[in-house]
Amino acid sequence: MAAIMTNQPADTPEGERLSKIMAARGLASRREADEWIAAGWVRVDGQLAQLGQRVAADARIDIDPAASAQQAHRVTVLLHKPVGYVSGQAEDGHKPAVTLVTAANRWSGDKTPLRFAPGHLRGLAPAGRLDIDSTGLLVLTQDGRIARHLIGEDSSVEKEYLVRVARQDGGPLNEVDLAPLRHGLHLDGRALRPAQVSWANEAQLRFALREGRKRQIRRMCELVGLKVTGLKRVRIGRVALGQLPPGQWRYLHAQERF
């Protein structure tokens, strides 16, 4: 009987999926890695890689320069999201924030040399969220490395917010309200990481967080008897909202790093 030939990749019996290792090394997102492998741009220990291949943790991975060139052309957009827009896909009749990324809405203060092109919208997705009632800095990117850096499970990029609050009982705000916000609260049965919380002014707090649970700041404030009446994200890592007007956007500069 003739042997049945298959196209199964030559695996290392013990090992991790190649795309996962590439993502862990910061070479590409897992989706990008699979695209590059399929295009023939990846070699493992000198041999052309195959989709689904498992490799040893210390395997030598070489990337064709064509992959880096493709990655360099992927854009990242910084948008000042207004109230009333959702971060991701349209829901409940509300438009997604990406619909604001048009030539007409580009900030006149954007100094990057890029010329807006429809292709910049392809695959442009939010790296993090702002709820519909919140404003401020929203990152939209085509680059899987940036998305993983900002919202991956091991991300520790700090996000800064200005939060207008009022006591639910109508009383005055005081320093006692801040102590539990800084450390000791739990959400969904899990302890929150320590946060930096300080006064921005007599009615506004400044939060700096290194995690992003769903509606985290609003829920934290509710736990200590505070109601959020306004929330604005002003910084992600080393990238600040700055003078970017509401509803407008700019490209991330090549020299900027989160």
Image: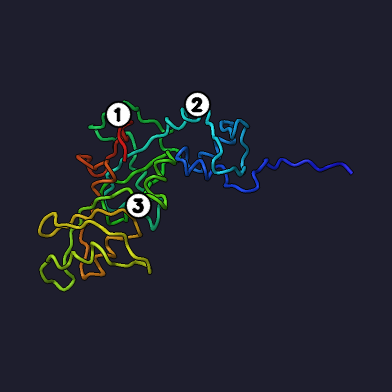
Q: CA distance from mark 1 to mark 2?
A: 24 Å
State whether residue 196 is above or below residue 147: below
Looking at marks 3 and 2 on the same chain, the residue that comes earlier in the sequence is marked by: 2
Res. 65 mark: 2
Marks 3/1 in contact by CB < 8 Å: the verdict is no
* Helix, strand or loop at mark 3: loop
Instruction: State the residue in front, 143 or 110.
Output: 143
What whole-number distance in Å separates the C-alpha atoms at marks 3 and 1? 25 Å
Q: Residue at x 31, y 41 (%)?
A: 258
Specify whether 28 is left or right of 98: right
Question: CA gap, disc 3 to disc 2?
Answer: 33 Å
Q: Which mark is residue 112?
A: 1
Q: Nearer the viewer, residue 131 or 35?
A: 35
Find residue 6 and report its image quarter.
top right
Ranked by sequence position, the earlier of labels 3 and 1 is 1
Compared across the picture, whether 95 is left or right of 18 comes to: left
- Name which residue lies at 25% across and 48% down: 136
First reached walking from the N terminus: tag 1 or tag 2? 2
Dot label at residue 129: 3
Residue 163 image offset from top left, x and y in percent: 20, 57
The correct choice, above or below, for 67 with respect to 95 in the image is above
Tell me the quadrant of the picture where the N terminus can be found: top right
Q: Secondary structure at mark 1?
A: loop
